[in-house]
């Protein structure tokens, strides 16, 4: 039997465990997928996982923290600076591939600039993917650094210029369903596209507010399926590089 899993915290509503265990059962694959909730991450923990598992996923808050404990990163993970898949001591990023596949069909000709809410591993993957798709991303943070915007900077001119808004924060994720990013939703119009990396609930407050303004919306479930399929390709076929 092969053994796979996911590290992160919390993992109460892990998509990956359900997806992979159902896949193994349906396709008669002799394997299991387990949860490894970890608030903190150490080199010893990562080494033990690599000894005991055939591959594993990495989610919040460890997508960047795991990097120093790996021997190598593939080209995409290195460019993004975040890892969500580990195989044979190598770190990969399939979040970007899943994100691009999900958002690509929704982009319109005038979608040239995007606001990316949050500065963690998911936001790095989203920025990389947007650039690949010809959309210029700008990070939005509560404590903006050079080249970023703060939430207080999101005035009418900015909102009109940036027609794509991607939520890469955990705000709105179950059980915290009554929260959402602090953006001026009244300035959103039918010209906007709102993408939420959160998938549970299906329609977050962020998406609800955008929908009420006439915006096109999409949640993160297709992104998750895309990254999971790419992860399995790495684990099962030993793929060296994934093409975006």
Image (cartoon, helix red, strand yellow):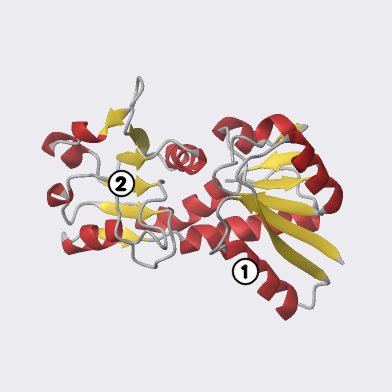
Q: Is 14 situated above or below 26?
A: above
Q: Is 19 situated above or below 155?
A: below
1 and 2 marks in contact (CB < 8 Å): no
Q: Position of residue 66 (x, y in %)?
A: 66, 37
Q: Report the front residue among 220 and 46.
A: 46
Crowd around label 1: few <14 · some 14–19 · many ≥20 (10 Å): some
Residue at 81 percent of width and 54 percent of height:
53
Residue at 23 percent of width and 57 percent of height:
210
**Residue, disc 2:** 165
Q: Report the front residue among 86 and 161.
A: 86
Q: Is 77 situated above or below 230?
A: above
Q: Position of residue 135 (x, y in %)?
A: 37, 39
Callout 2: helix, strand or loop?
strand
Q: Position of residue 138 (x, y in %)?
A: 34, 33
Which badge, 1 or 2, comes first in the chain's sequence? 1
Q: Report the front residue among 180 and 228.
A: 180
Q: Report the front residue among 32 and 36.
A: 36
Q: Which mark is residue 190?
A: none
Q: Position of residue 70 (x, y in %)?
A: 74, 34
Callout 1: helix, strand or loop?
helix
**Residue, disc 1:** 19
Mark 1–mark 2 distance (CA, rounded to whole Å): 27 Å
Residue at 67 percent of width and 39 percent of height:
41
């Amino acid at each position: 039997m092969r053994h796979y899993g996911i590290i992160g915290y919390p993992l109460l509503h892990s998509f990956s465990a359900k997806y992979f265990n159902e896949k193994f059962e349906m396709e008669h694959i002799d394997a299991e997928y387990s949860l490894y909730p970890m608030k903190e991450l150490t080199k010893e923990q990562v080494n033990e996982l690599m000894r005991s598992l055939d591959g594993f996923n990495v989610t919040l808050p460890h997508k960047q923290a795991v990097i120093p404990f790996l021997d190598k990163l593939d080209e995409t993970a290195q460019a993004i600076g975040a890892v969500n898949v580990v195989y044979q001591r190598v770190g990969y990023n399939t979040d970007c591939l899943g994100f691009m596949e999900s958002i690509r069909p929704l982009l319109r000709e005038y979608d040239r600039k995007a606001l990316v809410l949050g500065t963690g591993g998911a936001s790095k993957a989203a920025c990389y993917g947007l650039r690949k798709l010809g959309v210029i991303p700008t990070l939005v943070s509560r404590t903006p650094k050079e080249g970023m915007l703060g939430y207080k900077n999101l005035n009418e001119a900015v909102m009109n210029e940036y027609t794509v808004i991607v939520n890469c924060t955990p705000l709105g994720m179950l059980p915290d369903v009554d929260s959402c990013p602090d953006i001026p939703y009244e300035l959103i119009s039918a010209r906007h596209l709102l993408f939420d990396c959160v998938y549970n609930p299906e329609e977050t407050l962020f998406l609800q507010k955008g929908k009420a303004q006439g915006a096109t919306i999409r949640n993160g479930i297709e992104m998750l399926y895309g990254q999971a399929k790419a992860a399995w390709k790495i684990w099962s076929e030993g793929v060296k590089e994934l093409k975006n």
